[in-house]
Amino acid sequence: MKGRIMKGIAGFYYVDTGESGVYECKAKGIFRKDKRKPLVGDRVEIEVLSEEDKEGNLTQLLERTNELIRPAVSNVDQALVIFALEDPKPNIALLDRFLVMMEQQQVPVAVCFNKGDLVPREEAQELQNIYRDCGYRVFLCSAAHKEGLEELRAYLDGKTTVVAGPSGVGKSSLTNLFQDGVQMETGEISRKLKRGRHTTRHSQLISLGGETWLCDTPGFTSLYTESMEKEELRRYFPEFQPMEGQCRFQGCVHVKEPGCAVKEALEQGRIHRSRYENYVMFYEELKEQEKRRY
């Protein structure tokens, strides 16, 4: 029987097989032997041990289309990062960290600003313009007033989307709204997934019906840069790309060098100052990490 891993906790994997329901499965020893770890999002084959108790074994991992390191999930099409416009105010540095993470892993990403009912329209549009100018899709919505949801739902439709955002921004409210019309055995799934006990430390796949899935991820608070060199950071700010090769010095990192086309674009207002300041902050962090390594 084939299915998809929705959650993994303490060696147990919860596999949604569609009409047959969710099975609690253990991974067979062959995975440890091959040093392959099942991930949330994996498409798998299972053998059923008990139909009554919905228990089984994972017997095979099917081929992955991709695999993310942060968060550790597979077969992802895109990402959506959710921040509130107010209560709490958006932490733009944290938002930019997530965008860098997704750019590094080559995952298309969009930005959603929730709680649009709490701020003036001009304030919301100012933030929207910053990220649109960088090439990102940006959604303005209000979960409380159910505004702006149609366009966002269309973005999610038929895709597996990693959803992330800090606490208090309305991530759960939005994802719950999108589950309204889903026909599924919610009681059984909640019991099998032990929902509520592990909501913050584990990624979880949520079916919205058909081939639409949300991967709810734990909160993120830092820029994971174990495999990033400071010189490559500039590649992950898409608005810098038009200036690539136009600086006076080859390999310019756009921080202190004279004749820098990126800094020139900044002064001309073609690059937003908040984005550039976060770039410099991240660059200095990577520089400090490098010093500590050596």
Image (cartoon, rainbow, N blue to C red):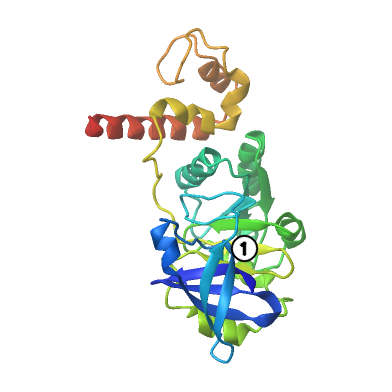
Residue at the location (40% across, 45% down)? 224
Give the image location of residue 187, x and y in percent.
59, 87
State whether residue 21 is above or below residue 178: below
Q: Nearer the viewer, residue 207 or 150?
A: 207
Q: Quadrant of the N terminus?
A: bottom right
- Residue 270 in sight from this viewpoint: no
Total number of numbered labels?
Answer: 1
| Residue 85 falls in image quadrant | bottom right
Give the image location of residue 239, x and y in percent.
60, 29
Is residue 101 found left or right of 186 in the rendered image?
left
Q: Quadrant of the C terminus?
A: top left
Give the image location of residue 143, x and y in percent.
65, 66
Residue at the location (39% across, 28% down)? 230
Considering every residue shown, the one lying at the far bottom of the view is 52
The amino acid type found where label 1 is placed reads Leu
Is residue 181 found left or right of 205 in the rendered image?
right
Q: Nearer the viewer, residue 45 or 246?
A: 45
Judging by the rendered image, the residue that carries numbered circle 1 is 214
| Residue 158 falls in image quadrant | bottom right
Assign a secondary structure to mark 1.
strand
Is residue 117 found left or right of 198 in the rendered image?
right
State whether residue 152 is above or below residue 134: below
- Residue 20 in sight from this viewpoint: yes
Residue at the location (50% across, 35% down)? 274
Give the image location of residue 181, x and y in percent.
74, 76
Residue at the location (23% across, 34% down)? 292
Q: Nearer the viewer, residue 98 or 130?
A: 98
Counting other residues with Cα less than 10 Å from the Cα at mark 1, is it few (<14), some (14-19), or many (20 or more)?
A: many
